[in-house]
């Protein structure tokens, strides 16, 4: 019978694989030292907010144009969040129509975190996902011959309603590249096939990645 013990070379390859996966992820757990994370059984989603971020100029006297966001950028990310949660047995969430109705009676000003806390209390949720999208650029060309690839950047966070504290933050910032140009993209091709994605499809992959990280946290 052959031994199943790993050789040093096999262990090295396993370590490299783990590092690749870690580099593909961008989530951070924020645990407060004296606060245990309460059970999150019911989630609400505060509609993702579109924010415009100007690139940093290379010189003081150089003006950098602000990249415009599509009018529906926040809706695209929010829709993907609901879509991913609806397909997974782990997630119980407040329907978007209930959230929309509750928001009509809540103030529209204040920070995202403050508004998330107000929403959570209004709908009886244990946790609220909130976030922002700063880039949503559509693919130019076809799925097998793009002249310019899709590019997406968004951030998500989880607020525990009981404590009013943000306990998790995650981010996704990707401009699709060919697998030969960047091996770190292997996970996207593995999930969705060797093609060029639309902005919505790339957003979906990012949301799946971030919610998978969050699910592991909540287990």
Image (cartoon, rainbow, N blue to C red):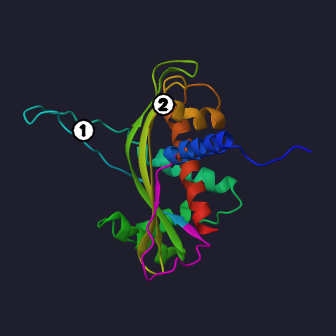
Q: Does the magenta stretch include residue 27?
A: yes
Query: Which quadrant: the C terminus?
Result: bottom right
Q: Which residue is drawn at 51% across and 42% down?
A: 203
- Numbered circle sitting on residue 205: none
Residue 170 screen position, x and y as percent: 46, 55
Query: Which quadrant: the N terminus?
Result: top right
Q: Residue at x 65, y 35 (%)?
A: 190
Mark 2 lies on residue: 176
> What is the magenta range?
25-43
Residue in front for this viewpoint, 164 or 217: 217
Residue 179 screen position, x and y as percent: 55, 26
Q: Is residue 116 left or right of residue 4?
A: left
- In the picture as drawn, the residue positioned furthest to the bottom comes out as 34
1 or 2: tag closer to the N-terminus: 1
**Pointer 2: residues within 10 angstroms few (<14), some, or many (20+)?**
many
- Numbered circle sitting on residue 55: 1
Q: Which residue is drawn at 53% across and 48% down?
A: 22
Secondary structure at numbered mark 1: loop
Residue 75 screen position, x and y as percent: 47, 48
């Amino acid at each position: 019978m052959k031994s199943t013990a790993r050789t040093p070379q096999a262990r090295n390859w396993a370590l490299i694989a783990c590092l690749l996966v870690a580099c593909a992820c961008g989530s951070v757990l924020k645990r407060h030292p004296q606060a245990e994370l309460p059970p999150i059984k019911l989630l609400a989603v505060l509609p993702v907010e579109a924010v415009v971020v100007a690139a940093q100029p290379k010189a003081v006297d150089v003006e950098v144009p602000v990249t415009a966001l599509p009018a529906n950028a926040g809706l695209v990310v929010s829709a993907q969040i609901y879509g991913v949660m609806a397909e997974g047995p782990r997630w119980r969430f407040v329907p978007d129509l209930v959230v929309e109705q509750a928001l009509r009676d809540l103030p529209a000003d204040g920070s995202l975190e403050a508004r998330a806390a107000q929403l959570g209390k209004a709908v009886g949720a244990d946790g609220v996902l909130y976030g922002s999208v700063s880039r949503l650029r559509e693919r130019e060309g076809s799925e097998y011959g793009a002249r310019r690839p899709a590019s997406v950047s968004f951030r998500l966070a989880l607020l525990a309603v009981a404590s009013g504290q943000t306990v998790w933050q995650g981010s996704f910032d990707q401009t699709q590249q060919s697998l030969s140009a960047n091996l770190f993209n292997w996970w996207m091709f593995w999930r969705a096939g060797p093609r060029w994605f639309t902005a919505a499809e790339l957003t979906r992959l990012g949301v799946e990645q971030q919610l998978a990280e969050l699910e592991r946290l909540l287990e």
